[in-house]
Image: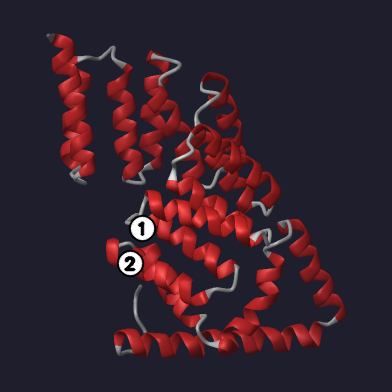
């Protein structure tokens, strides 16, 4: 009977999180910990709530407390890795992912995060490998498919990218995050109208999400050819590792400094002129907060 009561309390906390009632979820979880101080699940769930609130110091602390009670607690490991990843501590996140995979070698989420880190580092072939492993364990995960579509778009494999895109939409036709990644994939392929369509859907689903609004305004700017023209060099540089991109800029600055200066000035003018046009069209004023 006591186990049923514990389970019901944990499910209530999960439900409160789904409703975004995070203060209530924290209060319920703290009560749970007081009642069952030796149960690692309470500490792990509290760390998960704080991760949702982007309170990384507390999410890290409570995940560690959970792992002290139960070194192989699944939720605590997920929060531990996700906290490092979300904070942008990619080296530490990679180390934590390797540790987590020794316990959960078939957990697709960790391969998914590895793929995202490789993407951040410009190592798209490694990212592709990681996404394929993630999909091996979770074949019907729309978010994994959307990320895979994105990396295949960068690598120039349009057929594979479009196949993954279609599968992702069949699985999750109303997922804002899936739409965002598919918009990025379409943008990489030069399909700006489709990218705009996906971001419109993403904003429709989550109108209060700042990142989605910013991405939407950015893709609206890309409807102007003059702005897209000045984005070509940066788009090409995203296809190489960051260190190589940095070296290319250094060499270009040394050999073609006057041209680089002119390019930067023209880029700034193109960026702000198209941004102003978009702001006026969408909001009716020049300066807005996304």
Left or right of 255: which side holds 94? left
Q: Residue furthest top?
A: 1
Mark 1 Cα shell of 10 Å, populated few (<14), some (14-19), many (≥20) = many
Residue 176, which numbered label? Answer: 1
Q: Quadrant of the C terminus?
A: bottom left
Q: Is residue 25 visible?
A: yes
Q: Nearer the viewer, residue 164 or 238?
A: 164
Q: Quadrant of residue 239?
A: bottom right
- Give the residue drawn at x 38%, y 85%: 279
Q: Quadrant of residue 179?
A: bottom left
Q: Nearer the viewer, residue 202 or 102?
A: 202
| Residues at circles 2 and 1 in contact by the CB criterion of under 8 Å | yes
Q: Is residue 286 visible?
A: no
Relative to 43, say whether 265 is above or below: below
Figure label count: 2
Q: Position of residue 112 (x, y in %)?
A: 53, 41
- Give the residue drawn at x 45%, y 32%: 80
Secondary structure of residue under mark 2: helix
The span from disc 2 to disc 1 (Cα, nearest Å) is 7 Å
Look at mark 2 in the image and give the residue it sits on. Answer: 203
- Give the residue drawn at x 65%, y 88%: 265
Q: Earlier in the sequence, mark 2 or mark 1?
A: 1
């Amino acid at each position: 009977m006591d186990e049923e009561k514990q389970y019901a309390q944990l499910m209530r906390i999960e439900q409160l999180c789904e409703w975004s009632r995070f203060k209530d979820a924290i209060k319920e979880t703290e009560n749970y910990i007081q009642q069952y101080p030796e149960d690692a699940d309470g500490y792990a769930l509290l760390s998960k709530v704080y991760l949702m609130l982007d309170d990384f110091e507390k999410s890290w602390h409570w995940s560690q407390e959970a792992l002290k009670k139960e070194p192989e607690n699944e939720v605590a490991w997920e929060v531990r890795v996700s906290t490092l990843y979300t904070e942008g501590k990619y080296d530490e996140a990679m180390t934590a992912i390797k540790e987590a995979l020794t316990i959960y070698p078939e957990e697709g989420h960790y391969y998914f995060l590895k793929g995202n880190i490789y993407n951040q580092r410009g190592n798209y072939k490694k990212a592709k490998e990681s996404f394929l492993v993630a999909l091996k364990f979770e074949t019907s995960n729309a978010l994994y498919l959307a990320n895979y579509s994105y990396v295949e778009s960068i690598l120039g494999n349009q057929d594979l990218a479009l196949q993954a895109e279609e599968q992702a939409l069949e699985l999750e036709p109303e997922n804002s995050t899936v739409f965002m990644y598919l918009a990025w994939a379409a943008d990489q392929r030069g399909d700006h109208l489709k990218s705009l369509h996906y971001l419109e859907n993403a904003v429709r689903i989550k109108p209060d999400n700042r990142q989605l609004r910013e991405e939407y305004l950015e893709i609206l700017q890309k409807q102007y050819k003059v702005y897209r023209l000045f984005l070509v060099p940066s788009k090409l540089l995203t296809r190489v590792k960051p260190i190589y991109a940095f070296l290319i800029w250094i060499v270009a600055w040394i050999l073609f400094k006057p041209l680089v200066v002119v390019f930067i000035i023209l880029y700034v003018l193109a960026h702000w002129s198209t941004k102003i046009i978009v702001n006026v069209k969408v909001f009716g004023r020049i300066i807005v907060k996304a």
